[in-house]
Image (tube, rainbow, N blue to C red):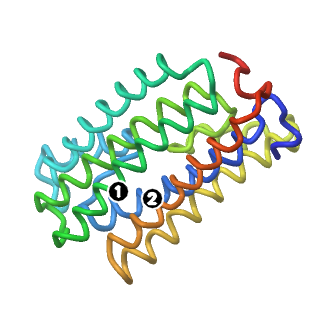
Amino acid sequence: MTDQDPAHGPLPALLLLLTVETGVVDAVSILALGRVFVANMTGNVVFLGFAVVGAAGFSFVASAAALVGFLAGAYAGGRFVGWFGRHRGRLLRNTTAVELLLVAVALVVAAVVHVVPGSAAAVAVAALLALAMGMQNTMARKLAVPDLTTTVLTMTLTGIAAEIRTSPRGTIARRVLAVVAMFAGAAVGAVLVLQTGVAPALVLAALLLAVVALGATLLSRRPAAWQTHGV
C-alpha cells in the first residue's frame, strides 16, 4: 500500500498498526476499567451522560477522568504538532514515543495494583490511556492520511458504503484494512484481558507503539517526499 501512495510513504502501514493498538486499548478500557472509552470520546461522552443519571455499570469518575485525560493529550499533541509538524516522520516518532511511556506507566500500575472497575487504579489507568489517545488523535489529524484516523471508524465505514461504486480500489482497500485492524486489535485485546488480565494487553499495546516509533525513526533517516507532504 505504501508503494502505491508515495505522498504518504510508510505512514499508512504505521497508522494501521496504531489502529490495531487502539483496538487493544479499547478492549482494556471497556472490559476492565468499567465501561469507559479512552480513544472514542463520542462513546465516552454518552457513557458520561448515562453515569450522570445513575445508570448501573457506568462510572462518572472514570469517564470524566478519561475525558479530561483525552483533552490534555490533545492539547499536548497540539504542542507536538507545533514543534515537529514540519516533518511527519519525526512527529510520528516523538508522539508515539511519549504514548509508549504513558502506556508503560499504565502497565506498571496494572501490574502492581489489582485493577477493578471503579477503583482508583482503574481511574488512573483510564486517564493515562486517554492521555495517550488524545495525543495520537491530534497527531493522526495532522498527518492527514485519508481514512486512517487510528481511533474512530464512523466516517471510514460511511465511506465504504456510500462510495463503494465510485472510489478507487486502493481507497476502498485502505478503508477496509482500517476496519479489520481495529477489529483485530479489539478481538486480541479482549482475549488477553478476559483470559490473562490487563497487564498482558497493555504489553501488546506497548509493543505496537514501540514498533511504530522504531519504524518512524528508521524510515525518517533519509529525506523523502512523504516526510513533508502537505505540511
Residue drawn at (72%, 52%) of the image: 176
Q: Quadrant of the C terminus?
A: top right
- Counting from the top left corner in percent of width and height, residue 195 is at 38, 83
Q: Residue at x 65, y 59 (%)?
A: 180
- Which residue is disc 1 drawn over? 104
Q: Secondary structure at mark 2?
A: helix
Report if residue 96 is visible in the image.
Answer: yes
Q: Is residue 161 above or below residue 104?
A: above
Q: Residues within 10 Å of mark 1 (few under 14, many from 20)?
A: many
Residue 58 higher or lower than 190, as above or below: above
User: Which amino acid is tagged 2?
Assistant: Ala
Q: Which quadrant of the view contains residue 30?
A: bottom left
Asked if disc 1 and disc 2 are in contact, CB closer than 8 Å, the reply is: yes
Disc sitting over residue 141 in the figure? none
Label 1, secondary structure: give it: helix
Q: Residue furthest front?
A: 221
> Which residue is the site of mark 2?
206
Q: Where does the image place residue 25, in percent across and percent down from the top left?
A: 41, 57
Q: Residue at x 57, y 38 (%)?
A: 149
Camera-nearest residue between 12 and 54: 12
Q: Position of residue 58 (x, y in %)?
A: 19, 56
**Residue 161 seen anywhere in this rendered image of the structure:** no
Q: In the picture provided, is 137 more to the left or to the right than 110?
A: right
Q: Nearer the viewer, residue 148 or 4?
A: 4
